[in-house]
């Protein structure tokens, strides 16, 4: 009796050549629908599934392989006499190779023109059932889901007459990984339909797109797994990104998202924190303002912008070695110029996909689980802001306060910053007290020769005491923005009124740990 191979694939890449080689090795090819038609037209002898089951394909192909003669042939444990007897009694022949890939559910979901019915019809039923059956019975069945495994399987069959147990187990693992990913995609789709933001059981499925040289440190192994729904970036030049590069790029994107609709804006980052942010009439001016905030840190850092990078700005950025440059677009002349430095990485940012990033959940791994929360990238509602002091900020101060509030939301807590309406002056980041953050923002401004007196102050959370207000008054700060919410808010407001300062409560905190 010939060995049997069942082939039913949606992605038919290289399948004809593979099936021919199986046929040459005296395998009987069982197949369905479009796969059977393709193989027959290629001159390969096939046995239709309907001939095995004595049952026609039905319901527009929804039912064709869901039959005991198929699953019995795949699931039989031929080491057990009882299984052999059942198979002989019911005329079920063993199937030793199963080649299946699945309906393109994921691709259909991502297609904006797909209807709900289109998506439902692309939920594969028979395919995952056969894969799970074959993967479970890997001791007797070779299950193949990936065309890149065809050559390895053929080589083993030609050399040994069968695949090794080690190979079958590895292929089983791939099959179960595929069905798990597939089911997670379906679950995510229905979760959105049900508007269930935090389901009782959370299934996350990402595809490994890159094995990294190492993680945050050389002794840590690492890989990058991407969300197929959200190809926000594409690398167009430079060597492979590292773990830390990915971390920095993520932070850079979250910063520039705050300035998507503004005039030309640039942020310079180092170790996931901005060293400066600027807005100008063009990108060159924006970069110069951002760079002036801290002229030391940008070396080897990241630059990201909200407009297409032009040659003049590229030349300005190029004055200091910048490891990564991120732009919505790169013209040919800019690319030719920037590619002269081989250690540089150039990243294209898809602003349309960035809209999706704003709405997705943030997930953070802990020692024993995951924390999941809404993104903090959504726009602030200025109508919710309240002027809580006797002195009201001027129009120019309001503009500066809006800019400063965007900036402080991107800093690690505790965070305090000094800004004008178009540039950062001093940044105090990630300290254990707000007073320390204020002191560091002052130190940084003075270190790089910037004037604090005409700037505003933004704080990512409330001031718990008036001591910071006292210090800000000494510096000549006239306007402050903070969320409010402290039991000592009135004490802080009174201090501002005492000094003739204006203060806005936003009612929204922007902690970033």
Image (cartoon, helix red, strand yellow):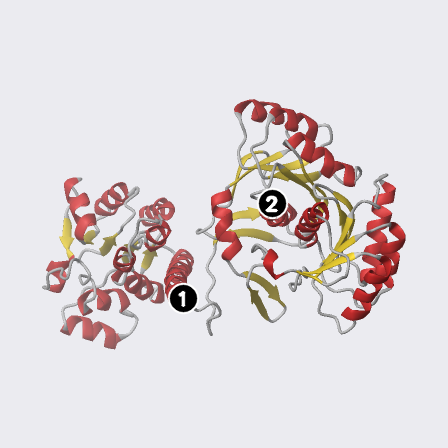
Mark 1, other Cα within 10 Å: few <14 / some 14–19 / many ≥20? some
Q: Is residue 296 above or below residue 513?
A: above
- Point out the image quarter for the N terminus: bottom left
Q: Nearer the viewer, residue 29 or 190?
A: 190
Residue at the bottom extreme of this rendering: 82
Query: Which corner quadrant of the image does residue 235 belong to?
Result: top right
Position of 224 with respect to 411 (left or right) is: left
Q: Which residue is mark 2?
A: 259
Position of 319 with respect to 123 (left or right) is: right
Q: Nearer the viewer, mark 1 or mark 2?
A: 2
Residue at the right extreme of this rendering: 474
Answer yes or no: is residue 30 visible: yes
Mark 2, other Cα within 10 Å: few <14 / some 14–19 / many ≥20? some
Q: Residue 441 at what x, y percent from top left?
A: 82, 50
Looking at the rendered structure, the number of numbered marks drawn on it comes to 2
Q: Residue 446 at what x, y percent from top left?
A: 87, 43
- Point out the image quarter for the C terminus: bottom right
Query: Which corner quadrant of the image does residue 54 belong to?
Result: bottom left
Which residue: 49% across, 70% down?
198
Answer yes or no: is residue 299 visible: no
> What is the distance, in whole Å, between disc 1 and disc 2 at their CAs?
31 Å
Q: Nearer the viewer, residue 360 or 133?
A: 360
Which residue: 35% across, 67% down?
136
Q: Secondary structure at mark 2?
A: helix
Q: Which residue is mark 1?
A: 191
Q: Earlier in the sequence, mark 1 or mark 2?
A: 1
Position of 343 with respect to 466 (left or right) is: left
Q: Secondary structure at mark 1?
A: helix
């Amino acid at each position: 009796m010939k060995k049997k191979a069942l082939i039913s694939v949606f992605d038919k890449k290289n399948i004809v050549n593979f099936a021919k080689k199986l046929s040459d090795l005296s395998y009987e090819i069982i197949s369905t629908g479009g796969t059977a038609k393709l193989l027959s037209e290629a001159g390969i002898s096939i046995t239709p599934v309907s001939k095995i089951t004595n049952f026609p394909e039905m319901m527009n192909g929804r039912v064709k392989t869901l039959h005991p003669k198929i699953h019995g042939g795949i699931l039989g444990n031929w080491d057990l006499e009882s299984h052999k007897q059942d198979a002989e009694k019911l005329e079920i022949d063993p199937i030793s190779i199963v080649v299946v890939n699945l309906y393109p559910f994921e691709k259909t979901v991502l297609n904006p023109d797909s209807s709900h019915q289109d998506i439902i019809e692309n939920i594969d039923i028979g395919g995952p059932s056969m894969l799970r059956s074959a993967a479970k019975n890997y001791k007797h069945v070779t299950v193949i889901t990936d065309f890149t495994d065809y050559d390895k399987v053929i080589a083993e069959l030609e050399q040994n007459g069968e695949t090794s147990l080690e190979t079958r187990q590895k292929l089983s693992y791939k099959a179960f990984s595929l069905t798990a990913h597939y089911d997670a995609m379906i679950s995510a789709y229905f979760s959105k339909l049900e508007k269930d933001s935090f389901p009782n059981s959370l299934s996350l499925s990402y595809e490994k797109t890159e094995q990294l040289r190492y993680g945050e440190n050389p002794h840590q192994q690492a890989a990058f797994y991407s969300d197929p729904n959200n190809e926000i970036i594409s690398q167009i030049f430079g060597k492979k990104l590292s773990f830390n590069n990915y971390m920095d790029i993520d932070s850079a994107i979250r910063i520039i998202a705050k300035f998507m609709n503004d005039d030309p804006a640039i942020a310079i980052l180092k170790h996931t924190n901005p060293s400066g942010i600027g807005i100008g009439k063009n990108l060159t001016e924006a970069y110069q303002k951002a760079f002036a905030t801290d002229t030391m840190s940008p070396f080897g850092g990241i630059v990201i912008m909200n407009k297409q990078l032009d040659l003049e700005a590229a030349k300005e950025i190029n004055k200091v070695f910048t490891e990564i440059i991120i732009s919505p677009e790169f013209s040919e002349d800019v690319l030719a110029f920037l590619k002269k430095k081989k250690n540089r990485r150039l990243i294209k940012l898809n602003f349309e996909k960035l809209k999706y990033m704003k709405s997705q959940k943030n997930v953070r791994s802990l020692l024993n689980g995951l924390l999941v929360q809404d993104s903090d990238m959504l726009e602030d509602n200025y109508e919710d802001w309240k002027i809580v002091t006797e002195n009201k900020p001027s129009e120019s101060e309001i503009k500066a306060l809006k800019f400063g509030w965007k900036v402080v939301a991107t800093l690690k807590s505790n965070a305090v910053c000094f800004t004008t309406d178009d540039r950062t002056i001093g940044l105090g980041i990630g300290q254990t007290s707000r007073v320390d953050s204020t002191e560091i923002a002052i130190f940084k401004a003075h270190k790089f020769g910037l004037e604090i007196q005409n700037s505003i102050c933004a704080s990512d959370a409330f001031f718990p005491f008036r001591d910071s207000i006292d210090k800000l008054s000494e510096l000549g700060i006239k306007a402050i923005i903070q969320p409010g919410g402290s039991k000592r808010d009135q004490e802080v407001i009174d201090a501002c009124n005492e000094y003739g300062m204006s203060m806005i409560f936003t009612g929204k905190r922007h902690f970033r740990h």
